[in-house]
């Protein structure tokens, strides 16, 4: 039987992405929506703290080990905004489209050379809610913000995130290419190496 681990997310795109990224572990990832309806609060000012809060919550409601990530986009011209509020940039119940439109409004009139951005991801693994030694990885993915969305793959700010060396947005990339290049893909790869090297039961 495959080991079950809860992913502290309801996002089906993220679930599929993470299942592919962690495939070598042969774990069965289950979304937190299998266990509870309400989301964990994310009041912390940093990605690391929010990821840990989400992972602990997932462990508590599921009784399983948990993986959580907190990720977002930081835009140079906006002094790092949206940052930790990326998923709620246009409001608490904002859709991806709402957030993208809010970002475009904030960047109206900003020239291309000042539209540099980076996706940032922190990913954590907890064996249980009181795990004193969480495994933590982090990674970034650099690009620029377009003036209009392009592409229909991915989620979040992917239609606006231009990847210069691919001459495409993140939303235009093949899933395998995105998983290799993205902040989440790199963080998951690093997390996998840390899990593989860790001593003691995982």
Image: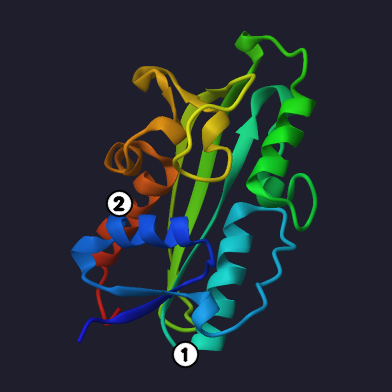
Write down the residue under mark 2: 189
Q: Under tag 1, what secondary structure?
A: loop
Other-residue count near label 1 (Cα within 10 Å), few / some / many at <14 / 14–19 / ≥20: some
Whole-percent x, y for residue 158 in the image = 52, 36
Whole-percent x, y for residue 1 in the image = 20, 87
Q: Under tag 2, what secondary structure?
A: helix
Q: Quadrant of the C terminus?
A: bottom left
Position of 99 relative to 109 (above/below)? below
Whole-percent x, y for residue 138 in the image = 45, 49
**Who comes first in sequence, dot 2 or dot 1?**
1
For residue 173, side relative to residue 111 (left or right): left
Mark 2 → mark 1, Cα distance in angstroms = 25 Å
For residue 104, side relative to residue 48 (left or right): right
For the point 72% across and 34% down, the residue is 101
Write down the residue under mark 1: 63
For residue 19, side relative to residue 49 (left or right): left
Q: Out of 186 and 180, give the one closest to the viewer.
A: 180
Position of 43 relative to 143 (above/below)? below
For the point 30% across and 75% down, the residue is 28
For the point 66% across and 41% down, the residue is 97
């Amino acid at each position: 039987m495959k080991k079950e681990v809860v992913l502290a997310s309801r996002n089906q795109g993220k679930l599929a992405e993470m299942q592919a990224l962690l495939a070598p572990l042969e774990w069965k990832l289950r979304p937190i929506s299998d266990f509870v309806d309400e989301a964990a609060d994310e009041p912390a000012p940093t990605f690391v703290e929010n990821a840990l809060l989400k992972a602990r919550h997932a462990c508590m409601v599921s009784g399983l080990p948990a993986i959580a990530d907190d990720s977002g986009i930081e835009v140079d011209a906006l002094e790092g905004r949206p940052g930790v509020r990326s998923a709620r940039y246009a409001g608490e119940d904002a859709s991806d489209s709402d957030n993208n439109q809010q970002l475009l409004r904030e960047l109206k009139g900003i020239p291309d050379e000042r539209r540099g951005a980076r996706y940032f991801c922190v990913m954590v693994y907890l064996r249980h809610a009181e795990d004193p030694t969480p495994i933590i990885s982090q990674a970034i993915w650099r690009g620029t913000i377009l003036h209009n969305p392009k592409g229909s793959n991915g989620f979040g700010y992917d239609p606006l995130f231009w990847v210069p060396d691919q001459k495409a947005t993140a939303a235009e990339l093949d899933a395998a290419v995105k998983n290799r290049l993205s902040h989440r893909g790199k963080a998951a790869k690093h997390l996998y190496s840390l899990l593989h090297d860790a001593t003691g039961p995982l």
